[in-house]
Amino acid sequence: MSSTKYIFVTGGVTSSLGKGIISSSLAKLLQARGYSVTIQKLDPYINVDPGTLNPYEHGECYVTADGAETDLDLGHYERFLNKPTSQDNNVTTGMVYQTVINKERRGDYLGKTVQVIPHITDEIKYRIKKVAKKIKYDVVITEIGGTVGDIESLPYIESVRQLKWELGRANSLVIHLTLVPYLSASRELKTKPTQHSVKVLLETGIQPDILVLRTERKLSDDIRNKVALFCNVDRDSVIESIDVSTIYEVPIFMYREKLDVIVLKKLDLVIKKEPRLRKWKTFLNKLNNPKHHIKIGLVGKYVELPDAYKSISESFIHAGASNDCFVEVDLIQSETLHIRNYKRKLSDFDGILVAPGFGHRGIEGKILAARFAREKNVPFFGICLGMQCAVIDFARNKLGFEGANSTEMDPETKFPVIDLMEEQKKITQKGGTMRLGAYNCVLNKNSLAYMAYKKRNISERHRHRYEFNDKYLKDFENAGMKGVGINPGSELVEIMEIPELRWFVGVQFHPEYSSTVVKPHPLFVDFIKAAVMYHT
Ligand code: GLN
């Protein structure tokens, strides 16, 4: 019997209740009490991974250091725990079926009929346990995407039921998250949706051990008693999760509700010591008492859904707190920027960030945003496509390369300053893959990047196909835009800066994926610092 304990988090009544944040907060508390914890997300959709999904569907695609394209909840896990996740931390129905079907084609099932139970459920259970194989965690928290009762999540729920039975009491438990809505007409909190959703879970054979109730108002003792009685859970296992101003307060609220203590007791784990949350609380204190206020223009094309830039927004929160600064982020749809209006539309920002992205829609607006920052000497941070746009602007307007472009946008351009590299061209013809996951980079000591990181060797996560075309590097450097970060193996340029400007940095990688609460990303920290200085 393995000594890893398993916690399953399910959701009822409605989606978007914040299972990811509750899982992360519980994990944070257990970690702060000295346990090693990881969190895993099971996604019920049939896509093999979210890499091909439009960000409007489920928000941003988060990339792990080992190069998996995953659900954005993994970003929360890393930001809360300050520990990397891996490919094993995200499982989709597509992945599960693909594996089972491949096995069937290989003849692994020896002529048996392949079925949801046991073949699909076995594969799910294998993947739940696999996450604790390489690193032996004390606790694995597995979040089941979707809402109980959905057709799609049934195989996952059945796998949880089986695992709970196999692992036995004290080795696993189920936390069910539901909503207690407030009806303003009758001025009452209503528990019926919770009762119904627990009933649905019971029909699948699972009795939840702990209920976490999302609510806008405080729950009375009467309500807690009623829910405990009707849903068959211990009185102290009815947890209130009231709306808070920032997700980073949730661990503190869960601590007050004793969620961690109840979990440890039920899992027969020792309650070693009070959670060590000193750094976390310092962060919250700075976050809640800012001395400065700045405005950043975030130029992108997915602005209608803020989740599309989740990791960037969270990085601003971390970097803001570390600078005692409230960072107001205005999302600017790059398609609305034109040569006639871009100066006016971008005039009142203390810093401009041009976001990552794919395809040509909105690209000219992003190039104008980089141009504005360069011409007006406003702090500028370009991420991935954002860096590429800064390069294109510089080529067109400083080097006089008329029509310079990325071959992603214009395959016929006379000046392909951003292009596919030779090896990449071969792969792309075979169906297209990206440079994904962490790569090393060596910094030039004389750069803003080095000042931020304070070291020469860094490793950052990538997700792109196109690269700076280094055949033009000399032209750029002679005119004042320098390549200051180089990949040691391939010699690819990863960072471009304009040293004569205040703070102008473009990076080919995604720093936003590795910013955490206790370790804000150095480039975001320095970008905000530059913006604060520019503001004052
Ligand atoms: N579309 C660009 C590329 O593939 C940039 C990708 C990104 O911004 N993540 O290189």
Image (tube, rainbow, N blue to C red):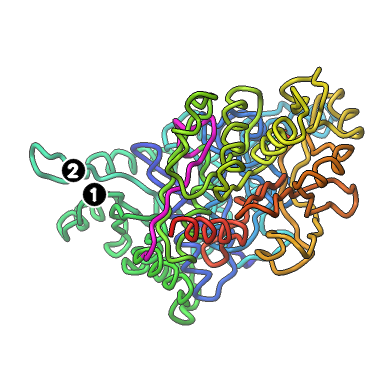
Q: In the figure, residue 330 lies in which quadrant?
A: top left
Q: Which residues are magenta?
A: 290-307
For residue 56, say whether it is visible: yes
The residue that label 2 is drawn on is 182
Residue projecting furthest to the top: 412
Q: Is residue 359 placed above or below 307 in the rendered structure?
A: above
In the image, residue 297 lies in the stretch drawn in magenta: yes
Left or right: where 109 falls relative to 382 = right
**Separation of disc 2 and disc 1 at Cα?**
7 Å
List x then y, in percent, for residue 23.
Answer: 47, 55
Q: Amino acid at mark 1?
A: Glu
Inspect the image, locate mark 2, and give the three-letter code of the amino acid beneath it. Answer: Tyr
If the image is split into quadrants, where does the C terminus sit? bottom left
Q: Which residue lies at the image location 57% right of the left edge and 56% below the top edge?
A: 527
Circle 2: element type: strand
Task: Decide: is 429 above or below 120.
Answer: above
Q: Is residue 119 visible?
A: no
Determine the quadrant in which ligand 1 lies: top right
* Residue 207: percent from left, percent from top: 40, 50
Give percent across and percent down for residue 430. 86, 24
Q: Is residue 199 left or right of residue 114?
A: left
Q: Nearer the viewer, residue 295 or 116?
A: 295
Helix, strand or loop at disc 1?
loop
Nearer to us in this view, 291 or 194: 291
Task: Residue under label 1, please give it.
Answer: 216
